[in-house]
Image (cartoon, grey):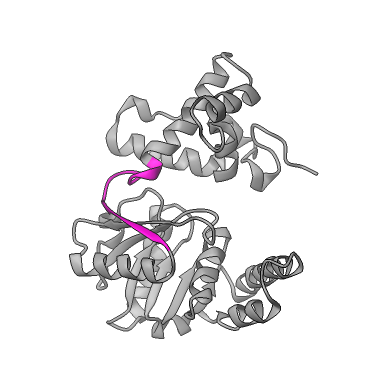
């Protein structure tokens, strides 16, 4: 299968790695060919570290990378599967899907890696039917894929993506479209509530996370989790939940907005509620 992955950042690179490791050709796309090549080079460097640590053979790394390719946009016309994982913005996603809709063959499967947005709205105006295929970060390690049906997504397409998810070593769950789907509808408000507890002065960031790790047996606390996800993404999803439901329980804490405006997004920026700068 030839898979065209649009958005070659952390998620896109991880998706490319997973498909390539299972024998599929993964075409990586970004804002430019040069940008996509930089992401491909980062993936190659990441695999080289695994080889150096004895977690992967050089032969396996070379074999995987031989199936990760960077192409011009037009090469996606021949893709069997398109996975969109660009910025979590409806207009941006609709724009890229519309351009692909115009050039891809009729049989191409269209999927989106959106973490919270409406599949139904995204599919509006497309000739190709659309399904959600939501991976989790880090993609190679995380087993779950949310397979999301919009209002007009046929059951046969959901079944196809479910079976494909199993084939690439993931565990799919079938989800009917709803803001945030399953995981983020529960998880993102958890991060938001951790910030609320911090802002109210109930406990320090460190102690909030320790409390949830040891008191609720969570692998990490809400503040480190938000740092891992990225507070810009947390804020975006909270806003989707609130705007779709108008339920006050989904109102983002103002401290998150302040952190995002300050560029303190978490691990990816080097600082969030904890410091990651070396």
Q: Which residues are magenta?
A: 170-184
On the image, the x and y values in percent for residue 115 come to 41, 51
Identify the residue at image location x=26%, y=50%. 177
Question: Would residue 154 be seen by someone viewing this image from the given angle?
Answer: no
Instruction: Examine the rendered structure and indicate whether residue 62 appears above or below residue 116.
Output: below
Q: Is residue 26 magenta?
A: no
Instruction: Examine the rendered structure and indicate whether residue 38 appears above or below residue 245.
Output: below
On the image, the x and y values in percent for residue 136 come to 47, 54
Identify the residue at image location x=68%, y=33%. 274
State left or right for residue 79 relative to residue 29. Answer: left
Identify the residue at image location x=60%, y=26%. 210
The N terminus: image quadrant: bottom left
State left or right for residue 33 relative to residue 166. Answer: right
Q: Quadrant of residue 78?
A: bottom left
Closest to the observer, 114 or 157: 157
Closest to the observer, 182 or 122: 182
Question: Would residue 178 be seen by someone viewing this image from the given angle?
Answer: yes
On the image, the x and y values in percent for residue 117 come to 35, 50
Q: Is residue 173 magenta?
A: yes
On the image, the x and y values in percent for residue 6 come to 48, 68
Query: How many dots with numbers?
Result: 0
Instruction: Examine the rendered structure and indicate whether residue 147 appears above or below residue 179.
Output: below
The C terminus: image quadrant: top right
State left or right for residue 275 relative to residue 170. Answer: right
Closest to the observer, 3 or 47: 47
């Amino acid at each position: 299968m030839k898979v065209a992955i649009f958005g070659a950042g952390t998620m896109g690179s991880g998706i490319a790695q997973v498909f390539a490791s299972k024998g599929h050709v993964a075409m990586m796309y970004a804002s430019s060919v040069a940008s996509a090549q930089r992401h491909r080079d980062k993936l190659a460097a990441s695999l080289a570290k695994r080889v150096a640590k004895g977690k992967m053979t050089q032969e396996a790394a070379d074999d995987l990378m031989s199936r990760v390719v960077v192409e011009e946009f037009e090469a996606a016309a021949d893709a069997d599967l398109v996975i969109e994982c660009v910025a979590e913005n409806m207009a941006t996603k609709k724009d890229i899907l519309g351009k692909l809709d115009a050039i891809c063959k009729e049989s191409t499967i269209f999927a989106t890696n959106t973490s919270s947005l409406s599949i139904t709205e995204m599919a509006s105006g497309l000739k190709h039917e659309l399904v959600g295929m939501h991976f989790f970060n880090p993609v190679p390690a995380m087993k779950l894929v949310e397979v999301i049906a919009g209002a007009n997504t046929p059951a046969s397409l959901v079944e196809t993506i479910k079976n494909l998810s199993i084939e690439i070593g993931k565990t799919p769950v079938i989800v009917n479209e709803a803001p945030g789907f399953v995981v983020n509808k529960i998880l993102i408000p958890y991060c938001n509530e951790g910030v609320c507890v911090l802002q109210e002065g109930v406990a320090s960031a460190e102690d909030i996370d320790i409390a949830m790790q040891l008191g609720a047996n969570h692998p990490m606390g809400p503040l480190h989790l938000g740092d891992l996800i990225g507070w810009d993404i947390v804020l975006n999803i909270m806003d989707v939940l609130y705007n779709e439901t108008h339920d006050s329980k989904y109102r983002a804490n103002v401290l998150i907005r302040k952190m995002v405006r300050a560029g303190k997004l978490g691990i990816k920026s080097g600082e969030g509620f904890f410091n990651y700068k070396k």
